[in-house]
Structures are given as structure tokens and as C-alpha cells.
Amino acid sequence: DQQVKQNSPSLSVQEGRISILNCDYTNSMFDYFLWYKKYPAEGPTFLISISSIKDKNEDGRFTVFLNKSAKHLSLHIVPSQPGDSAVYFCATRYGQNFVFGPGTRLSVLP
Amino acid sequence: EAGVAQSPRYKIIEKRQSVAFWCNPISGHATLYWYQQILGQGPKLLIQFQNNGVVDDSQLPKDRFSAERLKGVDSTLKIQPAKLEDSAVYLCASSLGRAEQFFGPGTRLTVL
């Protein structure tokens, strides 16, 4: 029973264009959402987060949007760079627990 | 500031053998997590410590997995005996309370 879904296993984007990674969740009680980036042979690295009281959070090239009614969040990367090529995990916190999605592999093509 | 340290980085064992992983969290981080990440999936929480007490171990297969956190700092995760389906990357993470987690590089376990 996946509580956090990332329905696109992979995504390819041209350098300089926008990358949009999507995430859906099932439990309306989730109150905090995070995105992590993971390079091969490394642990996930925290990227950006958003609280359920907000609908947008921006940090440089990275913006996360939250649509609570649709139980959907997305990560926008503008402009995309080759160094952004990695696996991106959506995660949520519910109480003390963190639940991760299966990840989306982003490839930014030069 | 040093990150989360884990060892070993890689381990290959045969089924029914035992294995142990070690984690040293970021200094001052009270919360420590162990995750299992199977290929193609997201990390799945196995156990969470707050200082040296267990907060959540509901997804830890307690018949074969055990974990401890000595003096609220380092932690070890043990599997005894290992099964083929235990092949995965085992990630340790730490955090200050409920804030975002900082992950170590992980230990890749292969069970033959």
C-alpha cells in the first residue's frame, strides 16, 4: 500500500528547460513534505520542503508546489542543469514517521 | 561539520549468515533512523531512535533484525540470519528532532 506515489520512474529534459517532478499522496493527515536528491553510491540529500499550511516554497532554482485538495505536490527545477541528473524522492512526515516515494530518475541532457 | 558515517560500504554474505552495520550520526543529532532501500524503491523506515530509546520499530522484522544505539550516539543494525530478500542498501540518517534528515552513504548488502 503505497502512501506516497511517484508515477514517473524516469524523466529526460534538455539543459536549460524546466524539469517538473510529480508526487501524489493518499493520507490527508500528512503535514510536511520534502524532496531529496540522490546520486549513485551516495545517500539522499535534502533539497527543499513545504509545510501543509503553504502552497509554494522557493529556493533558488527549486520550487515546490503543494495542492492539498488534490493531494499532489510537484518540484520544479528551472533552469535544469546536467548536475541535476539524479534520482529524486518525494517524502512526507506524519507525526514521527517519514514515508518515501519510489523515486523519479531525472536525466538532464546537455 | 562531519556528515553521517556508515561502515562498511559494501558487504557480501551467504544466506543464513550474520551481518552488522555501524552508523555514527552528526554530532548533536538526537534522532537516528535506519532505512532499507531495495533496488527501484524508496527508503523504508526500519527503526527510529530518539537518543538511546526506540521511537518506532513497527517495520523492523524482529525475528531476524535487531538494532541498538549505544549511549545515544553510535548505532548498530544486525541481521541474523540473513535471507536473499535482505539484499538492499541500508541507510542511516540523523536529524535534530523532527527536521529534515541527513543521510549517510549507505551500506550495500548482497546476500547470495
Image (cartoon, coloured by chain):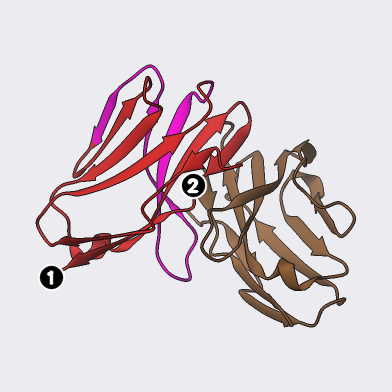
Chain colours: A red, B brown
Q: Nearer the viewer, mark 1 or mark 2?
A: 2
Image coordinates of residue A20 in percent, x first then y, are: 24, 46
Residue B100 seen in the figure: no
In the rendered image, the vertical position of residue B98 relative to residue B59, given as above or below: above
Instruction: Give the extent of the magenta segment.
Output: A29-58
Read off the residue under disc 1.
A110
Image coordinates of residue B63 in percent, x first then y, are: 90, 55
Q: Nearer the viewer, residue A3 or B19?
A: A3
Task: Using the numbered discs, state the Cα–Cα distance from disc 1 to disc 2 in whole angstroms.
Answer: 27 Å
Mark 2 chain: A
Q: Residue at x 36, y 25 (%)?
A: A70
Residue B58, located in which quarter of the rendered image?
A: top right
Disc 2 element: loop
> Three-letter amino acid code at disc 1?
Pro
Q: Residue at x 35, y 34 (%)?
A: A73
The answer to whether residue B34 is magenta is no
The quarter of the image holding the N terminus of chain A is top right
Residue A56 seen in the figure: yes
Disc 1 element: loop
Q: Nearer the viewer, residue B16 or A46?
A: B16
Q: Residue at x 59, y 32 (%)?
A: B97
Image coordinates of residue B82 in percent, x first then y, are: 82, 70
The answer to whether residue A56 is magenta is yes
Read off the residue under disc 2.
A101
Is residue B107 shown left or right of residue B100? right
In the rendered image, the vertical position of residue B82 relative to residue A44, given as above or below: below
Mark 1 chain: A
Is residue A104 shown left or right of residue A16? right
Residue A103, located in which quarter of the rendered image?
A: bottom left
The quarter of the image holding the C terminus of chain A is bottom left
Residue farthest top in this picture: A53
Q: Residue at x 40, y 24 (%)?
A: A51
